[in-house]
Image: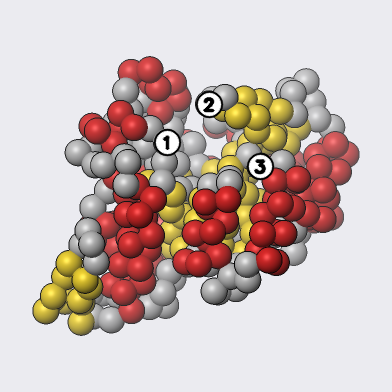
Amino acid sequence: MNFGVGLPNYGPHTSFDAIRRVARAAEELGYDSVWTTDHVIVPKENVEPYGHIFESVVTLAMVAAVTQRIRVGTSVIVLPMRNPVLFAKQAASIDAASGGRMIVGVGVGWNEPEYKNLGANFKNRGKRLDEDIALLRALWSSEDASFRGKYTQIADSVFAPLPARKEIPIWVGGNGEPSWKRAAALGDAWHATGAAPAGVAAAIQYFREHPPARQLTISARLNIDMNPNVPPTYEYRGAPRRRLTGTDDDIRATLREYAQAGLQQAALWFPTDDASTTLKQMERFMRDIAPELAS
């Protein structure tokens, strides 16, 4: 299993200094990747924790500039509420500048008022995302840019520079069957959020029955807190989520459950209220837990 780290680009106490410190530490400690969370302008009811947030793509550009090896990704960019051509350019620029380190995690999102704030249509977001993924692949494959879709049309245009690899991995976010279907048809990975091992196993079963168009990485975004007094489950927007916590043995055992279910990549969100706590737990995890499980 490979391990990444969620960057603290949101929360009332975050700063770019904290983001930079976490990114550099992740690279020095041997993590595979670092990830940003995407919100732009949430309603006041969601001010905690997303009212104070460094923009996801800009943050990755700054992080790529202060690191050398580690991959940088979005977990996940809510693409249907953005201009997909502009995002394609942003992602290609980061990938070209960083030597091919970009991962694009995409999803449909859930915050209807945020869509409205950005002048985007919440109701057709699934159809838009499907087209947008095809658009990204088309723009990244050739400097001669053309595309004819329902929502975006491009003719006789130029898209350069291309990504370093001419193809950036696209990881499809989500926890249910719609995300499994989209990942199997269009993605390079399925990227869950807080799914329990049983949820990962259910997705794997779906992919066995519906073979993906591409080789598919199985990934999950997981909260982790190495304080043994923190409960192993929590609720987010009315749905139960799994957290890695307990003793070191408890965390190892849970990660073995995930590995047995088929999880290949875990993006870990350590506590973000205080950067020193984040850094200490990141170091402890790589020293005491990861060696037994790392690919």
Q: Residue at x 77, y 50 (%)?
A: 258
Mark 1–mark 3 CB contact (< 8 Å):
no
Neighbours of disc 3 within 10 Å: few (<14), some (14-19), many (20+): many
Mark sitting earlier along the chain (2/3): 3
Give the structural element (helix, strand or loop) at label 2: loop
The vertical placement of 79 against 218, above or below, is: above
Mark carried by residue 237 = 2
Display colour scheme: secondary structure
The three-letter code of the residue at mark 3 reads Ala
User: In x, y percent, where is residue 3?
Assistant: 66, 53
The three-letter code of the residue at mark 1 reads Trp
Quadrant holding the N terminus? bottom right
Residue picked out by circle 1 = 110
Q: Residue at x 70, y 59 (%)?
A: 204
The residues tagged by marks 1 and 3 sit, at their Cα atoms, a distance apart of 17 Å
The residues tagged by marks 1 and 2 sit, at their Cα atoms, a distance apart of 10 Å
Q: Residue furthest top?
A: 45
